[in-house]
Image (cartoon, helix red, strand yellow):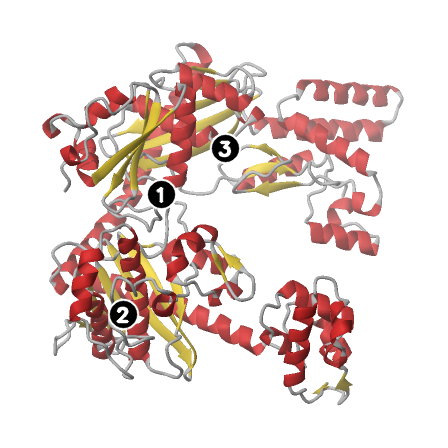
Amino acid sequence: MADPSSYRPKPGQIPDSPGVYKFRDEHGRVIYVGKAKSLRQRLSSYFQDLANLHPRTRTMVTTAAAVEWTVVSTEVEALQLEYSWIKEFDPRFNVKYRDDKSYPSLAVTLNEEFPRVQVMRGAKKKGVRYFGPYGHAWAIRETVDLMLRVFPVRTCSAGVFKRSAQIGRPCLLGYIGKCSAPCVGRVTAEEHRQLAEEFCDFMAGRTGTYLRRLEQRMHEAAEEMEYEKAARLRDDIGALKRAMEKNAVVLADATDADLIAVAEDELEAAVQIFHVRGGRVRGQRGWVTDKVEAVDTAGLVEHALQQLYGEESGDAVPKEVLVPAVPDPAEPVAEWLTGRRGSRVDLRIPQRGDKKDLMETVQRNAQQALALHKTKRASDLTTRSRALEEIAEALGLDSAPLRVECFDISHLQGDDVVASMVVFEDGLPRKSEYRRFQIKSFAGQDDVRSMHEVVSRRFRRYLHEKQKTGEWEEEATEAAGSAEPVGATGATGATGAAVTPETVGSPETTEATEVTEATQSAGATEAAGATEPAGTAGAAESAGVTGPTGVTAPAGQDADGPAPGSSGPLDEEGRPKRFAYPPQLVVVDGGKPQVAAAKRALDELGVDDVAVCGLAKRLEEVWLPDEDDPVVLPRSSEGLYLLQRVRDEAHRFAITYQRSKRAKSMKAGPLDTVPGLGDSRKQALLKHFGSVKRLRAATVEQICEVPGVGRKTAETVAAALAGAAPAAPAVNTATGEIIEDEAAGAASSNGGTRP
């Protein structure tokens, strides 16, 4: 616990101007961001007697180790900069609202030649018109189904649209009259776009004029005795009215407003938002947050406004925002909203009439959301807390391990040896910080030696980050003096050398492979083989990890940010980064030998504040370093169940990586061995020559004719293919025919080739 007086700025050093300030902890992590009309007055309030501070503020200032500020010209600029920094640094002590789900919206892709109506979630895209968000996707589909009768806009995917155009036959919706079938030319692109724009106008609330026009056309058709046309128009009017009834009129016509209500207690707060467009409730959403800072209702409202409109512009910001309490001062917030919309935005508290009644409804929804959240979380939080306490008691730890890292080794009969690291914080998986490794210091099967290497690499990176901040210089020197080199037994991983501050972070000793699970799920499996010298971590980690194949894997970051009571890995500016934050407990998948290897790795690096244990699969016993007998937890223990979850997750993650590497190696061809040749140029070569066989027979001059291939690359390709022995011809097992290399080479699409 730090003393605030140790980092208090000198008298007169703080300017008496508007600005934004940041508190950092001892690791340089930004833990709180705030704004002030007068930086001098606001910051001085943090350095008074601790007994006079709010408990949450007291915790923040005693956790911090430094404070810095940035002067701006206006309070509006301060509001904008505060929002940007909160989004960038994800401070631990700032209130952050998080959706418990992704809310769907009705979207019309006006940026396409033939606009499409569909359900969309996630970030908004340029050129797409959105309506909502809605509480449920089925509500959107019901509304769209009713409206397609009148506005037969395309709803099919790009693949279905292209297929129908190729075969000259529309899909089912085109046959039943719920699509105008632009794919087969029933309407032109201009006519279809006009339908989409009319659909948008109706959804935006301009319903009265369109309904009156339809009714007039219906009466004219009846007078001309075109009864079938009149009946169809009558049914269209009924469908539109049923669609309108799904959104009850709550305010006067043409009223555009967002109503925000807050329900709170001492620890948590729930926010509910109703989106009213054209006098009708078009959408609803809600957030729940922990009150990690001393903030009142007005402060919660200000945070909600930043979260809600920080990325919005234009009509997405309504003309009127109704709130239960107005931020103090209100003028900068209203001016900021006006700037986001491009026209005046009123920010006020409803006092009477329909708007006040609707605000009471939104308030009831917020109270119910808070009660439901507490009901859901109670059992969950209690169980996780009990599990962590049981683990701490069984392992003799001073406190519950809020951050647990687990390592597992995977291979296939000694080939493609890989390892995984999974992270659990507060008993929950933190997938953005999962990492996976390739074993590099030796070949073959040796789980103990592999475990030593992986743990060494992980904590060597941690010490490297501490060294960069000047925190570990003295400790590293002392540790280096006691470290003993170990030879071929593999006790020191890749080098077998003693660790010193100079060797920590050097490419020779700390080369590591880390790819987040978010990258893997996004399909960037080739980046799994990416190698990154720790000495270049500062540059690589902000831009991502680039593998040998040219695929870039982004640096792992969690959308939810660090869990309470922990900090995520950060760079020099306090941004999330790899390996900079140590766990309280390391779990290895295995028994006594694996535990001893992990402990030896920590001892060699001088890391003495991290506990180690192993979970053996046979009897699920827990092994501790230097203990002859395991710790046996009861089968009904929540602590054992949590350790099993951590171990099984590490095993799953390692197996997934190992299988992806094996699948990739099975698809590899001669061109994959050419250094510096990426997927684009491989495909260009195959497209130009038609097959690997023809490419192998080509001269360097002929290879240089391929766009993007220079002479040096051509010489490298020719040399690599000349040294690769051609494989036996492929045979069709069904017919006995020999498959020509030309066809096989042309069919290659992923850069994998066959000789």
Q: Nearer the viewer, residue 755 or 463?
A: 463
Q: CA distance from mark 3 to mark 2?
A: 42 Å
Determine whether label 1 and label 2 are within 8 Å by CB. no
Query: Where 42 sits versus 114, above or below?
Result: above
Q: Which tag is nearer the camera, tag 1 or tag 3? A: 1
Q: Nearer the viewer, residue 545 or 151?
A: 545
Q: Which residue is the site of mark 1?
A: 573
Crowd around label 1: few <14 · some 14–19 · many ≥20 (10 Å): few
Q: Which residue is the site of mark 3?
A: 311
Pointer 3 or 2: first along the chain: 3
Which label is found at residue 588? 2
Which amino acid does the dot numbered 1 rest on?
Glu
Determine whether label 3 and label 2 are within 8 Å by CB. no
Q: Position of residue 25 (x, y in %)?
A: 24, 42
Q: Position of residue 710 (x, y in %)?
A: 69, 66
| Numbered disc 1: secondary structure | loop
Report the side of 576 relative to 176 (left or right): left
Q: CA distance from mark 1 to mark 3?
A: 23 Å
Pointer 1 or 2: first along the chain: 1
- Image quarter (top left, top right, bottom left or bottom right) of the C terminus: bottom right
Which residue corresponds to the image point at 70% horizontal and 69% vertical from the top-left? 711
Which amino acid does the dot numbered 2 rest on?
Val
Which residue corresponds to the image point at 16% horizontal and 34% vertical from the top-left? 4
Which amino acid does the dot numbered 3 rest on?
Glu
